Image: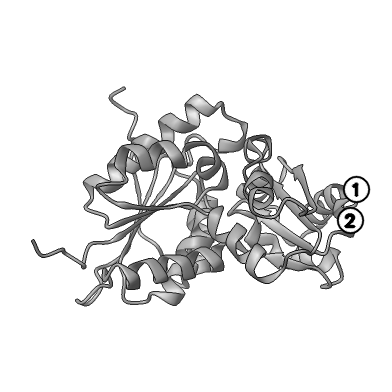
Amino acid sequence: MKVDTNRPIGIFDSGVGGLTVAHAIRQVLPDESMIYFGDTAHLPYGEKSPEAIHHYAEKITRFLIGQNCKTVVIACNTASSVAYASLVEKYGRKVQIVNVIDPVVDYYLENLAPAKVGVIGTKATIRSGAYEEKIKSRDPEARVFSKATPLLVPMIEEGFIFDDISNAIIRAYLSEEPLRSVESLILGCTHYPIIKNQISKFYDFSVEILDSAAIVARTVKKLLVESDLQRSKKPEKDRFYISDYTPYFEKISGMFFEEKINLKKLDLWKEE
């Protein structure tokens, strides 16, 4: 049976953070179409229970599969750390599922190890130990230092970037040892590339900052090429859905894609 390669790529996150991944995918795969779902009604995922995160992630994945997506990208570190395995178990035969943690771990081990690496992320991501466990399972001598930075996501979602407030919060988190003296830093949340330059500036641009968005985009491209799933027709217009309207989402999406994005509010939980 012939496989339809012209199906879209599905991407989801709790809010605007996943747009960093969507934008990076657009850069490396300009001929592909995307369907993005931002679960703004339930952000931040990092403060939610594992059961709630599983519930949100599964519902959105089912929606994207129902939209005939050929690949689903979990553009959220929290959902990747908590729900990826169960999503693959349930839906892996129907659709390719990509998380944002494994590609970054691969990149670090292949290009930067044994540099002392820090990981910052939401409480749920850091509590899961996903990055440290995956790195140390392949390099037991690795020096990995993790820290939850829970104020960064709401700070970004509320639009506090490139100002004194965001600089103070970033400085407060990264000034603590051992993060202050790491040689590389994993941005363990897809929101964080939005403030990547501020983080780099804190380190005087001397620390390698691992931006999951660019790394994951290259992984998605490699996967589509290897699976012979690259689109053959002219791409359709990308679709962007949110579970609750926020003015900042529209503002940020326009900044990323340099055009007005047509946002549609869709409450997947309305009938529950």
Q: For the residue marked with disc 2, what is the amino acid?
A: Arg
Name the residue rendered at 83%, 47% in the picture: 173
Tell whether 112 sits left or right of 180: left
User: Can residue 215 be seen at all in this image of the molecule?
Assistant: yes
Q: Position of residue 259 (x, y in %)?
A: 43, 71
Residue at mark 2: 180
Quadrant location of the N terminus in the rendered image? bottom left
Query: Disc 2, disc 1: CB below 8 Å?
Result: yes
User: Looking at the image, which is closer to me, 43 or 221?
Assistant: 221
Seen in the picture, residue 155 relative to 207 is either above or below; the reply is: above
Seen in the picture, residue 92 relative to 167 is either above or below; the reply is: above
Quadrant location of the C terminus in the rendered image? top left
Q: For the residue marked with disc 1, what is the amino acid?
A: Glu
Disc 1 crowd, CA 10 A, few/some/many (<14, 14-19, 20+): few
Seen in the picture, residue 97 relative to 91 is either above or below; the reply is: below
Disc 2 crowd, CA 10 A, few/some/many (<14, 14-19, 20+): some
User: Looking at the image, which is closer to me, 41 or 69?
Assistant: 69
Task: Tell me the distance, in whole angstroms, between the alpha carbons under discs 2 and 1.
Answer: 6 Å
Name the residue rendered at 69%, 49% in the picture: 136
Name the residue rendered at 44%, 76% in the picture: 28
Task: Count the numbered circles shown.
Answer: 2
Q: Position of residue 200 (x, y in %)?
A: 78, 67
User: Can residue 158 be seen at all in this image of the molecule?
Assistant: no
Tell whether 214 sits left or right of 30: right
Seen in the picture, residue 268 relative to 104 is either above or below; the reply is: above
Tell whether 33 sits left or right of 23: left
Residue at mark 1: 176
Q: Secondary structure at mark 1?
A: loop
